Image (cartoon, grey):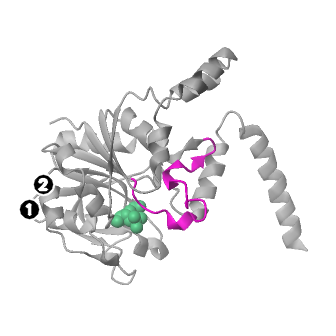
Amino acid sequence: MKVRKAIIPAAGLGTRFLPATKALAKEMLPIVDKPTIQFIVEEAKASGIEDILIITGKNKRSIEDHFDSVPELEQNLSEKHKTELLKVVQSTTDLGVNLYYSRQAHPNGLGDAVLQAKSFIADEPFIVMLGDDLMSDKVPLTKQLIDDYEKTHSSTIAVMRVPDKDVSKYGIIDPEQEQVPGLYNVKNFVEKPDVADAPSNLAIIGRYLLTPEIFDLLESQEPGAGNEIQLTDAIDRMNKTQRVFAHEFKGDRFDVGNKFGYVKTNIDYGLVHPEVKDELETYILDLAEKIQKKNKK
Ligand code: G1P
């Protein structure tokens, strides 16, 4: 069956970015000039996804507004012959995918957010995309998972090696042998283990391809880490009855879900952004020199 649908959970409170996220959805924080959620939607489209359900919550109305048209703005830009800007604005509505929204009243963890999509997904395999992780590779990571699925017809979770100090922030897999290079059988999936108990440093990153059997498991899932319904725990149970693979991502991952990662991603993306890259590079080189001089004193 073709993988056509994706879910983007976006109901989280974004407490790591307060006060910016007091009145603004964290998914709307820009990387240079584009909100993070737009990168996610574009990755879905580039991977052949047709329908996306965004799970929203309080303070998230700006996400719906962002993907809606603003006729006055478009008219103004067109009258002033600002054609490039007009194209930029139109690219937020001419996405080539259908967007749907569901507002979650009482968020209770990632597993609970995914469960909201049960009737939207019905009985198809689907993708979950977390907005905190931007991925860059020749083939989009979501498409890489879909390509795996077409061969294995199994759930496949994207993973990446992380330093030991970061292991306790992630879902971690206990890998068995590689099936083919980069694709692992998995013994166990563990949510946020202590580094001493962690079975590996292969961490779940924000892209999942799941078969619809996950929903029955989520419905009966007991709270886990943080006393929330964890998707990782339901995946671990599913792995006991049907094979769940882990796909090791070899491209670049930008974690925009924490302050340092967010600032770094703005710099990395700024260095390839046509409008700012030259000035930014000169600025960074000057700044590095100043910092070095200051540290020598
Ligand atoms: C979630 C998942 C975790 C995964 C991580 C990836 O955690 O629960 O398994 O490794 O996303 O970013 P969160 O970052 O929401 O705490």
Label 1 close to label 2 by CB (< 8 Å) = yes
Q: Main secondary structure of the magenta part?
A: loop
Q: Earlier in the sequence, mark 1 or mark 2?
A: 2
Identify the image quadrant of residue 198. Answer: bottom left
* Left or right of 264, for residue 197: left
Q: Which amino acid type is marked by label 2?
A: Glu
* Left or right of 129, for residue 69: right
Q: Position of residue 14 (x, y in %)?
A: 49, 62
Residue identifier under label 2: 213
Disc 1 residue crowd, few under 14, some 14–19, many 20+, Cα 10 Å = few
Q: Position of residue 219 (x, y in %)?
A: 15, 63
Of helix, strand and loop, which one carries label 1? Answer: loop
Q: Which amino acid type is marked by label 1?
A: Thr
Residue identifier under label 1: 241
Is label 2 within 8 A of ligand 1 (CB to nearest ligand atom)? no
Whether 250 is drawn above or below 22: the answer is above
Q: Position of residue 96 (x, y in %)?
A: 38, 27
* Magenta stretch, residue numbers: 10-33
Is label 1 within 8 A of ligand 1 (CB to nearest ligand atom)? no
Q: Looking at this rendering, what residue extends furthest in the left direction? A: 241
Q: Nearer the viewer, residue 265 or 38?
A: 38
* Left or right of 294, for residue 226: left
